[in-house]
Image: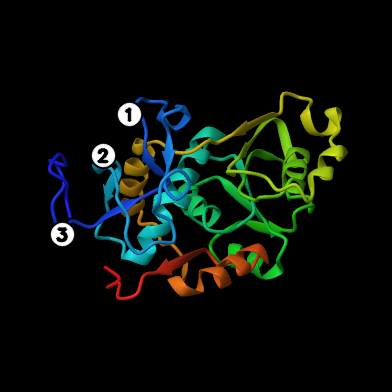
């Protein structure tokens, strides 16, 4: 259904809703106190029905079916923003710390934008590292493995602290680490005690977090993803199996993105 004030929307139009439910519409709306997140501040996650603000209901390109589109709206859009903040240039080295729903999309995006860049993937699970190589990474190693070359930029998509320390150690002088996470867990926080100013921070190394997304991030990324085209790797589960999907995520059993299907969903 379409509300009476949603003048640009049409009944039957295929749209997607991302992490951003609504905000103030400014260029920095991702940082605004008005930012409202889907599933956190309003209902909409793990649900059969949801109400979305018309300005933040994004038309889904025909290049993607529903399951493929789902991770683009959150993991893909935030990965797009993280890649921008990384300020990588063609021919440089990009590290992806963790290789799940967001990172496997960032790899495809970076390959398109920076065809001469080298992309290294880090993951704790050997099967995930093998998956990263199949997806086109130039090298894959464990979290603490030394990469073949220093990283000009790294994007950390993990919920843990050890990858932050490992990423900083792998950065080239002047390199930048972008932490793409809503939160970090407490269980390995002691890894931060291993930080050394000389090894991890000196030589103008930088750390930057990525916070939320703007509506423009989603629109720009969806258009570019369709043009490339990006091919999300998805594992689908019925909504009733959400807990199983979450347990597999926690165990690191990830091959791309996990998507929950609503009963009766057509897939298009």
Residue under pointer 3:
12
Give the residue displayed 77% in from the left and 41% down from the top: 165
Q: Which color scheme did the rendering employ for the protein? A: rainbow
What mark, if any, has residue 114 been given in the picture?
none
Residues at discs 2 and 1 in contact (Cβ within 8 Å): yes
Nearest the viewer among 264 and 15 is 264
Q: Nearer the viewer, residue 196 or 190?
A: 190
Q: Quadrant of the C terminus?
A: bottom left
Q: Is disc 1 placed on a helix, strand or loop? A: loop
Depth check: give the residue in front, 32 or 27.
32
Left or right of 58: which side holds 250?
A: right
Label 2 packing within 10 angstroms: few (<14), some (14-19), many (20+): some
Residue at 55% across, 53% down = 103
Label 2 to label 3: alpha-carbon separation = 17 Å
Position of residue 223 measured from the top left corner of the image (x, y, whole percent) = 30, 47
Mark 2 — residue? 55
Q: Position of residue 73 (x, y in %)?
A: 39, 51
Identify the residue under disc 1.
25
For image coordinates 44% across by 67% down, the residue present is 260
In which quadrant is the N terminus drawn? bottom left
Q: Residue at x 62, y 31 (%)?
A: 208
Provide residue 202's location: percent of width, then percent of height.
79, 25
Earlier along the polypeptide chain: callout 3 or callout 1?
3
Q: Residue 250 falls in which quadrant of the image?
A: bottom right
Residue 87 seen: no
Q: Nearer the viewer, residue 140 or 123?
A: 123
Task: Indicate which disc, 2 or 1, sits on the residue closer to the N terminus.
Answer: 1
Does 146 sit left or right of 23 as displayed? right
Q: Earlier in the sequence, mark 2 or mark 3?
A: 3
Res 251 visible: yes
């Amino acid at each position: 259904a379409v509300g009476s004030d949603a003048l640009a929307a049409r009944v039957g139009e295929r749209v997607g809703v991302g992490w951003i439910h609504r905000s103030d519409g400014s260029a920095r709306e991702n940082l605004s106190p008005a930012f409202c997140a889907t599933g956190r501040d309003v209902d909409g996650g793990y649900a059969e029905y949801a109400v979305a603000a018309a300005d933040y209901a994004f038309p889904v390109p025909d290049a993607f079916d529903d399951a493929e589109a789902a991770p683009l709206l959150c993991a893909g859009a935030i990965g797009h923003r993280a890649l921008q903040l990384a300020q990588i240039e063609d021919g440089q080295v990009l590290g992806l710390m963790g290789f799940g729903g967001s990172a496997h999309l960032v790899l495809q995006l970076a390959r398109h934008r920076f065809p001469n860049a080298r992309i290294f993937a880090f993951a704790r699970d050997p099967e995930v590292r093998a998956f990263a190589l199949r997806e086109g990474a130039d090298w894959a190693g464990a979290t603490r493995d030394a990469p073949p070359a220093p990283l000009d930029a790294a994007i950390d998509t993990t919920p843990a602290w050890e990858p932050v320390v490992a990423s900083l150690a792998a950065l080239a002088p002047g390199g930048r680490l972008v932490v793409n996470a809503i939160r970090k867990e407490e269980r390995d926080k002691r890894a931060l005690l291993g930080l050394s100013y000389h090894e991890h921070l000196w030589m103008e190394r930088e750390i930057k977090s990525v916070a939320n997304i703007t509506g423009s991030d989603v629109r720009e990324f969806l258009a570019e993803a369709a043009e490339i085209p990006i091919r999300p790797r998805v594992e689908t589960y019925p909504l009733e199996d959400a807990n199983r999907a979450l347990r597999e995520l926690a165990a690191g059993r990830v091959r791309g993105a996990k998507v929950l299907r609503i009963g009766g969903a057509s897939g298009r």
